[in-house]
Amino acid sequence: MRLRASAARVFAAFAGLIACAALAVGCSDLGAGGLEGPIETAEASGGPASGDLLISNWPAYIDRNTIPNFEEKSDVSVEYVEDVNDNNEIFSKLQPTLAKRDSSGRSIIVVTDWMAKKMYDLGYLQNFDKNAIPEVNKNMLPTLQHPSFDPERQFSAPWQAGMTGLVVNTAEAPQIKSINDLFEDPSVAGKVTVLSEMRDTIPLIMKADGIDPNKATADDWLAAIDKLGDAIDSGQILGIVGNSYLNDMARGDVVAAIGWSGDAIQLQADNPDIQFVMPEQGCIIWADNMVIPVGAPNPDAAYEFMNYVYDPKNQAPIAAYNSYTTPVVGVQEIFEKTDPELAKSQLIFPTEEYQKNCSPQPEPPRLQTAEIEKAFEALRTGG
Amino acid sequence: MRAWAQKKGIPYFLLFPGLAWLFVFFVVPMAFMFGISLYEGSLDTTFEFTWNFDNYSDSISTYDTQFLRSFLYAGIATFFCLLLAYPLAYAIAFKAGKWAPVLLFLVVAPFFTTYLIRTYAWQTILSNDSVIADVLRSLGLIDDRILKTPAAVIAGLTYNFLPFMILPIYASLEQLDKRLIEAGRDLYSSSATAFRKITLPLSMPGVIAGTLLTFIPAVGDYINATFLGNTNQAMIGNVIQSQYLITKDYPVAAALSFTMMAIIVVIVLVYIKFAGSESLMGEDRAL
């Protein structure tokens, strides 16, 4: 008796729900893609910066002292948030408000090259007022000044650059030198992970098979995704992970991974055997960029912060902390005096010779991007 | 008028805040989600409302593995929760005496740490070099590792939802009129028979509430599969998360959420029908 009554009520509720759907459709706004109109420039007022500055960056990407020192030297009060864990995730989080020209208070966001380009194409970023960032113009590493996605650095300034390659526990698996070893060496079976950032992992697999990732077709991308899927099904590769591979390696559950150059250095604190290994067929080179979103409340402060971190003496502690490739000229000279070992680091100051086989991070063929991303996600959420 | 207000108006008035809350924060979002599940398109082009019911058939046929896996893992975890929780709740209710409050506190104590951190800790508990992995290996129960296997995900689910099973069972056992058992013993029933004929039936409301409180959230869980599982242990929650945040296919994500909810509602209705709604609603006790 009770049951019938409650079941009837449940079904009535569902009927009501479907009726409400019609109403909901009228007012749902799922985001109609990009913003209309020309890209705006975030004009600097010319006066000194003041007020609040909200910066969104990736975790463990800055030393302890930079923000307090900057606050002391300027009138700006900084809220520094480490809420970028994944390019796609931060995009999904901000997209609904960016589509309404609202940056949720952020004046600087740090995203990887391809995401900066994607956001720019959707109209979610502003052009820089180049007159307001003299230090950035003057001190940016020449090799970073004209990337294909932003040839004149109109809307992006590298926070740090880096390499994607092999992170290896050299005590457990010293023989791992190539991406192919991850797929073929039986002694590391089940102790290998790859990154969930598709544009790092898949191009490295293609390079290992002799394909230039910057000329690869959609079929090449899909074939590499299939190859990865087979290796996961066979148990050779343990999984597709984000930053969590760091924990897996520190614990010893993973002995070799596709990973980022600076991570290896941070892991050495726990285990000195963990090292970044340049894959035989070369690495993927990328940069994470400071960008100014539409509706940024305080571009003046954003410019002041960019100028501050592009001053070599302020950049030095950031570079020393995270061991990624620093985008600022002059840091090496500082380290030669203060810390000669760091000045020789191939990770912070990679030579042309060291990076000779590396490729800039590629984009999948434009028309098939969605299809390729879906195939990779399907793999990540295992079918 | 005044008499009406006192007799009939007040109950409705008292219901109003709860109903309004449910309407604004449950019914309306639900309707929105249902609407979204019928869109077509992508973020790069536009989303258009086209009564696109294909989202449902497509998403079910694409992700049937993850659906089955979710219900399987949640079902097994619920079973183990019941197996662990009933004896513990029984011991706390009947045997613990003055220690009962302490034991209850220990059951609830894990909640003082967040869910995320507790699951993270299980990565260490189950890691390759851990004592547990060593013991299981030497017993020959696993050949290699336990972390990033289905067993790890099910273990995590069991651990995380165990208190939701213990507490309702304890509550129903604790309220049980112990004179009924005495009466049974006086009539020459064995302990086992007394348990089977008196204790177990009277604790059924707790068991049913506990299984529902465990099974329903476990089906939709994605934290355990994320941290303790592997790509091939992804549950439907992982797929929905990825569809919303990575692929940004909102209609498919909404359709998946709705399908999952519908399946759970059907399972719960069938379960209650067989288990008896009276025991859930507590009519036995009212008698």
Image (cartoon, coloured by chain):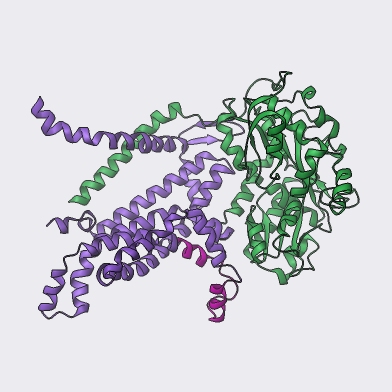
Quadrant for the N terminus of chain B in the image? top left
- Image quadrant in which you'd find residue A311: top right
Q: Residue at x 81, y 39 (%)?
A: A313
Q: Nearer the viewer, residue A37 or B18?
A: B18
* Frontmost residue, B69 versus A126: A126
Foreground of the two, A138 or B276: A138
Tell me residue A109's x, y (percent): 66, 35
Report x, y in % for residue A206: 77, 53
Q: Is residue B222 visible?
A: no
Is residue B142 covered in magenta?
yes
- Chain in purple, by letter, is B
Q: Which span is picked out in magenta? A: B130-157
**The C terminus of chain B is located in which quarter?**
bottom left
Please determine whether, in this image, residue A322 is positioned above or below residue B120. above
A128 left or right of A10 in image: right
Q: How many marks?
A: 0
Is B103 left or right of A90, judged from the image as shown?
left
Residue B213: image x %, image y %? 35, 55
Q: Which chain is green?
A: A
Q: Position of residue A200 (x, y in %)?
A: 72, 49
